[in-house]
Image: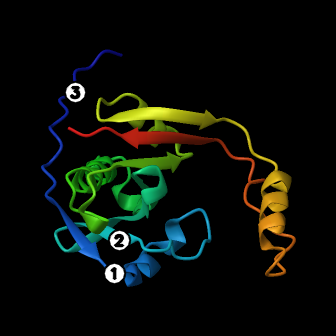
Amino acid sequence: MKKKIEIGKRPDIKLEVWKVNGTYWKLFKEHYYLDLPHPPAAEYFVGVVDGELVAHVAVCPMFTANAYRATRLVVMPEWQGAGVGTAFLNEVMQYHLEGNGRCQRKYHTFFHTSHPQLCGYLRNTAVWKQTNAILYGANKSRSNASITKTGKKGGITGCGYGGHFRAVQSFKYLGK
């Protein structure tokens, strides 16, 4: 069967970016794959289309590395694939690179994700650079040993990060 089908142009989407407080996270939390406490000293942003909340990201300072770290990117399921998540992420990263973030530092932002389509986009756009890729899970015993050693004074034992056995890729926002 051979048939020509005209596919129309996507409708224009007018995305607004709002800087908000951490209370907005509860509206996105059920769509995030990890259950972690609020990041310390984070700035929170939401993407809004026609009054509807469509995306969320938190940005934390990493001043010891002269950088920021973006985390908790969530795009509501009904908006995934429409391009709002990447446009939103890029806008918030550019905001920080221009010195509008915490302490007005003009720093790059690092971002980690395991989402295959998002990794593909970030890897193939000029404003992002891939910095690392761990394509298999980590054993948390090394992290546990470090935390236990550091926490002996406070009695912290039996914890650690890692061991989640998921691929994680790291990216740095270079800017426009």
Q: Quadrant of the C terminus?
A: top left
Spatial separation of the CA atoms under disc 2 and disc 3: 43 Å
Q: CA distance from mark 1 to mark 2?
A: 6 Å
At label 2, the amino acid type is Tyr
- In the picture of the structure, the residue carrying the numbered disc 3 is 5
Tell me the amino acid under the disc marked 1. Asn
Is residue 120 something one can see in this rendering? no
- Residue located beneath label 1 in the image: 21
Looking at marks 1 and 3 on the same chain, the residue that comes earlier in the sequence is marked by 3
Foreground: 144 or 119? 144
In this figure, which residue is indicated by the disc labeled 2? 44
Q: Could you say where residue 56 lies in the image, as x and y percent from the top left?
A: 37, 66
Q: Earlier in the sequence, mark 1 or mark 2?
A: 1
Left/right placement of residue 114 relative to residue 109 reads right
From the viewer's perspective, tell me whether residue 120 is left or right of residue 161: left
Residue 108 placed where, x, y %? 34, 47
Task: Say which residue appears at 84% left-offset and 81% top-offset.
Answer: 155
